[in-house]
Image (cartoon, rainbow, N blue to C red):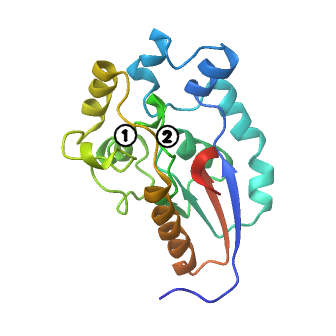
């Protein structure tokens, strides 16, 4: 049952990832061969991103949020853990990125649980929870298949359409409304519509 209580929701974009570093600092393009490396799928924070997350810790803590909600992408999780802490965190695929690049190929739930055992991933679908075009869902059932599709085709997705994105955004809004907490911080992405 949705809460009718007024809520304050703070949105935090993840700090610099290794993919962001390559694209914006080293001035690479999506077409560069290095940018096709599997190392950039579900890109973690870069060293600068780790510093950025640590540097905002006092600001995040000052929000006095009762719960943190994070996207399952590693860059968002790592920003959350370094700036918010590791308690009272909910992982929600509803606030994930609008897939467009290799860094938007996520990690499976099992893989995430191995790397972040302190977090609860029970609400994250087990295999492909990130955006994949509807007509490819039966073929692209895990991270490896998405990556292989990218290498063979040059692309595996065209970016999440508004028709797919808006219902996901609505679902996330309902999820926020259903929470008992009134002060929430969300760790997400630039193109998540928030």
Quarter residue 184 falls in: bottom right
Sequence-earlier tag: 1 or 2: 2
Q: Does 53 sit left or right of 45 as displayed?
A: right
Tally of numbered tags: 2
Against 67, residue 117 (above or below) is: above
Q: Which residue is mark 2?
A: 74
- Percent of width and height locating residue 127: 27, 47
Residue 60 or 168: which is nearer the viewer?
168
Please name the residue that numbered disc 1 is placed on: 107
Q: Is residue 75 visible to the viewer in this orientation of the structure? A: yes
Q: 32 or 175, which lies in front?
A: 32
* 156 displayed left or right of 141: right
The residue sitting at 57% across, 78% down in the picture is 177
- Distance from Cα at disc 1 to Cα at disc 2: 8 Å
Vertical comparison of 44 with 154: above or below: below
**Residue 113 relative to residue 94: left or right:** left
Q: Position of residue 90 (x, y in %)?
A: 50, 62
| Most foreground residue, 28 or 55 | 28
- Disc 1 + disc 2, Cβ < 8 Å: yes
x 37%, y 27%: residue: 155
For disc 2, the neighbor class at 10 Å (few under 14, some 14 to 19, many from 20) is many
Residue at 48% from the left image edge and 36% from the top image edge: 100
Q: Quadrant for the C terminus, please.
A: bottom right
């Amino acid at each position: 049952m949705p809460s009718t209580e007024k809520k304050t929701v703070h949105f935090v974009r993840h700090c610099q990832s290794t993919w962001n570093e390559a694209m914006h600092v080293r001035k690479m393009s999506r077409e560069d061969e290095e940018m096709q490396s599997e190392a950039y799928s579900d890109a973690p924070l870069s060293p600068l991103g780790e510093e950025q997350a640590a540097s905002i810790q006092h600001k995040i803590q000052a929000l006095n949020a009762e719960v943190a909600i994070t996207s399952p992408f590693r860059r968002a999780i790592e920003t959350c853990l370094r700036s918010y802490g590791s308690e009272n965190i909910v992982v929600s695929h509803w606030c994930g990125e609008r897939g467009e690049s290799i860094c938007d190929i996520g990690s499976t739930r099992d893989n995430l649980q191995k790397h972040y055992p302190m977090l609860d991933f029970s609400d994250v679908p087990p295999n492909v929870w990130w955006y994949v075009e509807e007509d490819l869902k039966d073929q692209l059932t895990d991270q490896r298949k998405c990556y292989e599709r990218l290498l063979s085709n040059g692309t595996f997705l065209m970016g999440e359409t508004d028709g797919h994105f808006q219902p996901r955004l609505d679902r996330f809004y309902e999820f926020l409304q259903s929470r008992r907490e009134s002060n929430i911080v969300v760790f997400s992405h630039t193109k998540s519509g928030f």
